[in-house]
Amino acid sequence: MAVVVLAGCAVVREPLTADENADRAKQDMAALFGDQEPLTAPLGLYEAMARGVKYNMDHRLKLMEAALSERQLTTSNLSMLPALTAKAGYEGRNNQSASSSRSSLTNIQSLETSMSQDRERAVYDYGLSWNVLDFGVSYVRAQQEADRGLIVEERRRKVVHNIVQDVRSSYWQAVAAERLLKRLDPLQARIDQALASSRTIETQGLKRPLDALVYRRQLLEMLRQVKQIRRELVGAKIQLAALMGLKPGQEFQLAVDEGAFQEPQVGIALPDLERAAMLSRPELREETYQGRIAEKDIKRAMLQMLPGITLDGRYNYDSNSYTESNHWWSYVAKVNFNLFDTFLNGPARIRESEGAKDVAHTRRLALSIAVMSQVHVSWRGYQQAVSEFRTATELNQVESAILDQTSAAQRTERSSEMELISAEVNSVLAELRRDMAFADVTNAMGRVFLTAGADPLPAQVDGHDIPTLARAIKTSMERWREGKLVSATAEDLEAERQDKASQKVEVETAPLNAETPVAVPAFTPVAVPVPVAAAASAPPVPQPSARLLAMQSPAPAVSRGETLDALIVAAAEERPANAQALSAVSSWWEDVGLGLMQAKGR
C-alpha cells in the first residue's frame, strides 16, 4: 500500500501542449501590441521618442524592476516589527497523566500515584517578542534596500537615455529611407530599361562589341549601387518600429520636410558639460549608492558583534481543571552573547566591508575618468560630424546642379541617356550621404547630452499619454540646446560659473609674479581642430583667457603604455597630483577616441 501511495506521488515531466503554446503566444501578442495608442498621423521625432519611452520593452522591464524594488523596501520595513504570535490547540491522551515521586534520601516512594492534568484540555496564548539586535540589523538592511531601489531607478534612467538616443538615430535613417526609396524605384526601372536596350544593341551589332560591353558594365555598376542603397535603407523603419514597440511590418508615415535638415547647435560650454556629467550620470550615481551600501555593511557588521537582547511578553490560557489560575501573563528578558562573533567573525566582517567600500570608491573614480573622457570624445565627435555634414550638404547641392544641367542637356540631345542616369545615381547618393551626415550630426549632438547625463523627461510629467510625453521631451531638448541640461543641477552650474568668473577676475587683476598663488580649473577646454574650408563657419569652442592659460602649470605627461592604476590610487588617496593626473588621463582618452573615429572614417 505504501509503495502504491509513493508511486502515485512521483513527479513526471509535463511538456507544454499545443493548446497551451497557442494560448501563450496569443496572450504574449496581446500584451506586446494590444494596449497602444493608434498612429493616426505622420510620426514626428518627439512622438517617436515618446513611444519608445512608453512602449519599449526594455523600459517596461526596468519599470517592473523599480516596482519590485519598492515592494522589497516595504518588506524590509515590515521586517523591523516585533513578532506577534497567537497559538491555540486542543490536547488529549488515552489515559491519565499520573505520576509519583521517591525520596532522594531513602529512595522510598513518598506519595501514592497522583495526577494534576486533565486527559483533555484546551490551550492558547498570545505573545509579543522583540529582538533588539535583529531590529537594528533589519533597520540597516532596510536602508540598503532603499539604496538598491535608487540604483534601479538610475539604471532605468540609463535605459531611457539609450532608448531616446537609439530612436533619434533610427528615426533620421528611416526619414532618409522614406525620402530616397521614392526616387530609387523609378531610377531602377530606367536602368533596367537601359540594360534591356543595351542587350538589344549588342545582339544586333549596332555598336562595336567593346563599346556595348563597356556601356552595359556601367549600367550594371549603377544598378549595383542602387540595390546597395536599397539594402541599407530597407530595414531602417523596421528598426524604428521595434524601438517604439510597434508590431513588425506595421505601416506608418514619418513627418519631415526639407527645412528639418538644419545644423543642430550645442549651446553649452565643455566645462559645464563635464560638471553636469559628474553630477548627473546614472553610472556615477549608481556607484555612489553602492558605496553607501558598503558603508552600511560596516555598520551591520558592528551591530552583529553586540549581544542579542530578547524581550518577550505573553498572555496564556489553559483549561486544565487542576490549575488554580487558568489565565496568566508571562514575560522573559534574555541576553545572548556569541563570543566568536564578537572577537573573531565580527572584526573579519568589518575588514571585508571596509575593503568593499574602498573598491566601490576606487571604481567610482575610475568611472569618473571614463565619463569625462566620454564627454570630450563626444564633443570632438560632434565637431567632426558638423564639418562632415557641411561638406555633404555642399556636395549634395553640387550634384543637384549637375543633374539639372544634365537633364537640360539631355532634353536638347546634347547629353546621352547614360550621362543622365549617372547624374541621377550620383544625385541620389549625394542626398543619401547628406541625410546620413545629418543623422550623424544629430546623433553626435544627442551623444554630447547623453554623456552629460541629461534626462529627456523631467522629474514630473503632467500625463503619460503620447502627446504629453512628446511635448515634455521636446521642451527638455530645447532646454538642452539653451544650455540648461537638468533643473536639478542648474544651481550648481550657476554657482560654478560665478566661481570661475571670480577666479578669472582675481587672476587678471593680480600682479604677474611667481609668489602670487593662482587657482586654475582642473580641466581645461580643448580647442577642436576644424578643416580650413569650414573654419569660418564652425561653431565656436569656449576657450579660457590667454593670461589664465599662460599662468597654468602644465599637467604631467602620461605615456601610452602607462596603466591607470597608479593614477586611480593617487585619486583615491587624495594626493595633490589628483587633478593633474585626472586631466592628463582625460586628454589621453580624448586622443584615443579621436583616433578611433578617424580610423572609422577612413
Image (cartoon, rainbow, N blue to C red):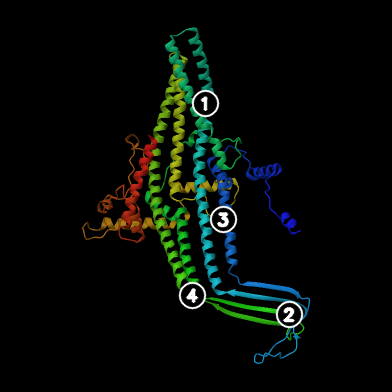
Q: Is residue 342 above or below residue 160?
A: below
- Report the Cα–Cα distance between label 4 and label 2: 39 Å
- Residue 106, picture quadrant: bottom right
Residue matched to label 2: 318
Any part of residue 262 in sight: no
**Discs 2/3, front:** 2
Residue matched to label 4: 339
Observer-nearest residue: 92 or 184? 92
Would you say 207 lies left or right of 32 here? left
Determine contact: label 4, label 2, CB under 8 Å.
no
Residue matched to label 1: 183
Image spot of residue 482 (x, y percent)? 44, 48
- Report the Cα–Cα distance between label 2 and label 3: 49 Å
Quadrant location of the N terminus in the rendered image: bottom right
Q: Residue at x 44, y 10 (%)?
A: 209
Determine contact: label 4, label 1, CB under 8 Å.
no
Determine contact: label 3, label 1, CB under 8 Å.
no
Would you say 436 lies left or right of 325 here? left
Image spot of residue 484 (x, y percent)? 45, 51
Label 1 neighbour load within 10 Å: few <14, some 14-19, many 20+? few
**Mark toward the start of the polypeptide (4 vs 1):** 1
**Mark toward the start of the polypeptide (1 vs 2):** 1
- Residue 581, picture quadrant: bottom left
- Report the Cα–Cα distance between label 3 and label 1: 47 Å
**Mark toward the start of the polypeptide (4 vs 3):** 3
Any part of residue 321 in sight: yes
**Discs 4/2, front:** 4
Callout 1: SS: helix
- Report the Cα–Cα distance between label 1 and label 2: 93 Å
Identify which amino acid the numbered label 1 is placed on.
Arg
Q: Residue at x 63, y 41 (%)?
A: 38
